[in-house]
Amino acid sequence: MDTNIPINSVHLLRTRSRWRRSFWRRFVKKERQTQQPEREPAMTNALLIENATIITMDPDRRIIERGHILIENGRIAAIGEEDYAGDRQAERIEAAGMVAMPGLIDTHAHAGHMLTKGLGSVAEDWMSVTGRIYATATDPEFWAAEAALSAVERIKCGTTTAALLFGGGPDIMRSEAPEAAEAHLASVAAMGVREVLALGPNRPGQRHVYRHYTSTAHDDIVVSPDRQIDVATELVDAWAGRDDHLQVVFSLPVFDEQELRDETVYRIACEVRDRARERSGLLVQDGHRDGSIAANDARLGLFDERSLLAHCIDLTEADRAVLKRTGAKVAHNPSALMSVYGRCPAPELMEDGITVALGTDAAAPDRPFDMFRNLFQAHRYHARHFADDAVLPPQRLLEMATIEGARALMMEDELGSLEAGKRADILLMNMRQPHLWPPHDPVQRLARFANGADVDTTIVGGRILMRGRRLVAQDEDAILDRALRAFHLAIARAGLSART
């Protein structure tokens, strides 16, 4: 690839104009035809779940042994013990033998990773290959097909809300133009799950060249952080209030103390910080460790209650003090590579009153989107450190994946627990299985023994997305086939066919 091609401003302006005129006509129509061949996801004005064991995660952490949940217009209208006493006509779901619980919330993942699994023998190799694919081999169809595949795994594992970085961390963010992100968002919207998509600039100081494809040719462009900030701002503004399932927010690379002395780095960080605060949105960062939180606080005053910081390993006392003072939230990823390289002191942070939620770090190179596996991994990770299996008891683990996840995303008034008035994001877990038997202490069984395959029914905003382990209004085989076509095309473009 020729890395001496300058930015073609005319090309970028024409690209933006074409996108504004035709994106929704092309991509949204395609998503509806590809992923919803028969009908919209099932949604009635009223839905009644009956005879479930209900783990509410409400302030009292109530567990209702046999109860009902009435859903009206996408929200929980009533929840209580025994049979519903009202006369409301509703579609009924018999949930005897099941646990009803809040949908799981994954507070840190990455878009794109579903189609890079198995492409590296070790982490460093995988990161190199993934960066090559993202920068030189993808088009909007890749991002749309990958998003649908990602949403299917989340639905089937019970994750109703996820926060994703758009690309491979701080160095290959696909924010040089809006088309890829718009294709991703249209695909997620068609699938019906909730998502917070974070995007922003790459790390300054490196020369990033991305390849844009047309039906017959391609252009190589040099990507600047300033251009990426402008595109991110355009997308944040365009999606504000457009879809109550989707948000677009800013991301910013993590800079250490030495990097922050560079005036370009300082200017870019301030610009992203200010644009995020002007819009009262989240600011997401991936990879804090070993003094970086304190350094960014001292140089930028970067953090407040809308800061979501992923990994946070090997923190200093100064780092922890900043988290406690500013109200910044932590996304702990116990299955991630960063948790191999260092330790996030999640239990200690929670003792300090800091919000700590769970994330998967996405479905590659060596982990799935299954949040239940992360519940188990989080317990073992910290129990081994302290040589004490009382660390992170089951109730605490479920909190990290539900109400604390909602709090980390500033959504605790809407999501994360089953309470009247909140949005109806609900899982029905099939508990009548050998590995979840006998029927005693449902919280412990879910936190210690369950996995994503135990999710029977997934409901988001009152819409039934999956029932009886089958997607309600999506053709799963078509989504798999579409993703495979996008994968093979990207592999060929990247010159990686020998790896498959």
Image (cartoon, rainbow, N blue to C red):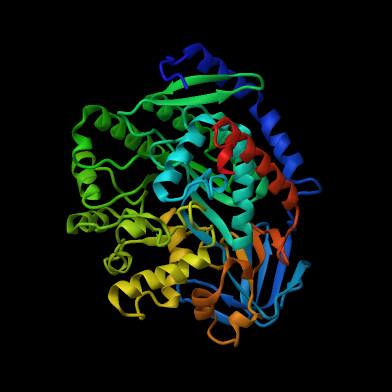
In the current view of this chain or complex, which residue is farthest to the top?
Answer: 10
Name the spot of residue 24 as percent of width and height, x first. Answer: 66, 31
Residue at the far right: name it.
38
Q: Nearer the viewer, residue 58 or 345?
A: 345
Which residue occupies 47% across, 14% down?
8
Q: Residue at x 40, y 72 (%)?
A: 379
Judge whether residue 145 can be spotted in this image. yes
In this rendering, position of residue 292 left or right of residue 115: left
Is 292 left, or right, of 207 in this rendering? left
Residue at 79% x, 49% y is: 39
Q: Specify whether 200 is left or right of 298.
A: right
Residue 253 at x, y percent in the picture: 34, 40
In this picture, is 58 found above or below 65? above
| Residue 233 place in picture, x, y as percent | 45, 31
Image: 32 above or below 312:
above
Name above or below for residue 463 compared with residue 306.
below
Q: Quadrant of the C terminus?
A: top right
Taking 202 as reference, is 335 above or below it? Answer: below
Q: Of 154 and 57, which appears nearest the observer?
A: 154
Which is more toward the observer, 422 or 338?
338
